[in-house]
């Protein structure tokens, strides 16, 4: 485990990604009419994920207890694979209460002790998004995965004060931990950088 943490720290330093903290302090202001409630998120996720929604409710409650209520979320699908270095690609729709819906694409590299591949339905909770166009940035962090046929997990990625929390329910064969980022774009691209 220490080797994984060291590798992640070295990779983060080498890539020069100075990402902010995803801590709960100051992460979310008190909610108003532009935030989604736990019930709204669980209902939307239940429709999207189907049978794994019981686990989804628990993960959403954990995210809300740590970061508060999100002011946006993305529903989509993605796939990734890695042999030490990896790539992930996906697409979905960003939902907000007062700025409308927006089609988004994401892609990104990763490096770490990470092997295998997975495909997932993904719900991303978005915190502190000042405007829908602010999603078109790179959001970095450390992730881990353990899929053997099926799995469910949550990570946190940051860029300044905006926090993106991908919640994935997927299938595949993948095990590892990595450091990397997701870059959101308005159009699909093969370039993960």
Image: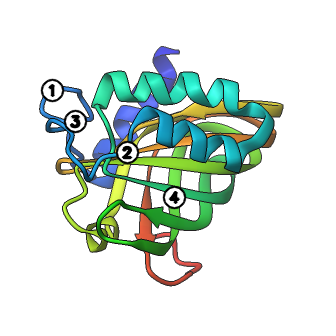
What's the distance in space between the residues labelled 2 and 4, CA to CA? 30 Å
What's the distance in space between the residues labelled 4 and 3, CA to CA? 20 Å
Which residue is disc 2 drawn over?
36
Q: Residue at x 62, y 60 (%)?
A: 76
Q: Earlier in the sequence, mark 1 or mark 4?
A: 1
Q: Residue at x 56, y 48 (%)?
A: 123
Residue 174, disc: none
Q: Residue at x 19, y 61 (%)?
A: 130
What's the distance in space between the residues labelled 1 and 3, CA to CA? 9 Å
> Do the CB atoms of the residues marked 1 and 4 lie less than 8 Å apart?
no
Of residues 87 and 138, the one nearer the viewer is: 138
Q: Residue furthest right?
A: 149
What's the distance in space between the residues labelled 1 and 4, CA to CA? 28 Å
Q: Residue at x 23, y 27 (%)?
A: 24
**Label 3 residue SS:** loop
Residue 109, disc: 4
- Which of the two discs, 1 and 4, sits closer to the camera? 1
Which residue is disc 3 drawn over?
21
């Amino acid at each position: 485990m220490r080797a994984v943490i060291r590798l992640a720290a070295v990779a983060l330093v080498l890539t020069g990604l100075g990402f902010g903290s995803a801590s709960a302090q100051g992460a979310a202001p008190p909610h108003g009419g532009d935030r989604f409630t736990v019930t709204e998120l669980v209902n939307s996720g239940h429709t999207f994920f189907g049978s794994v929604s019981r686990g989804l409710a628990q993960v959403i409650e954990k995210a809300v207890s740590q970061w508060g209520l999100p002011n946006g979320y993305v529903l989509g699908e993605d796939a990734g694979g890695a042999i030490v270095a990896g790539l992930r690609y996906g697409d979905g729709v960003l939902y907000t209460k007062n700025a409308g819906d927006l089609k988004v694409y994401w892609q990104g590299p990763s490096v770490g002790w990470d092997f295998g591949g997975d495909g997932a339905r993904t719900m991303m909770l978005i915190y502190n998004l000042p405007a829908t166009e602010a999603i078109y940035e790179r959001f970095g962090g450390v992730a881990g995965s353990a899929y053997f046929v099926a799995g469910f997990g949550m990570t946190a990625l940051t860029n300044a004060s905006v926090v993106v929390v991908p919640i994935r329910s997927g299938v595949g064969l993948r095990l590892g931990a990595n450091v990397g980022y997701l870059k959101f774009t308005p159009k699909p691209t093969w370039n993960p950088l």
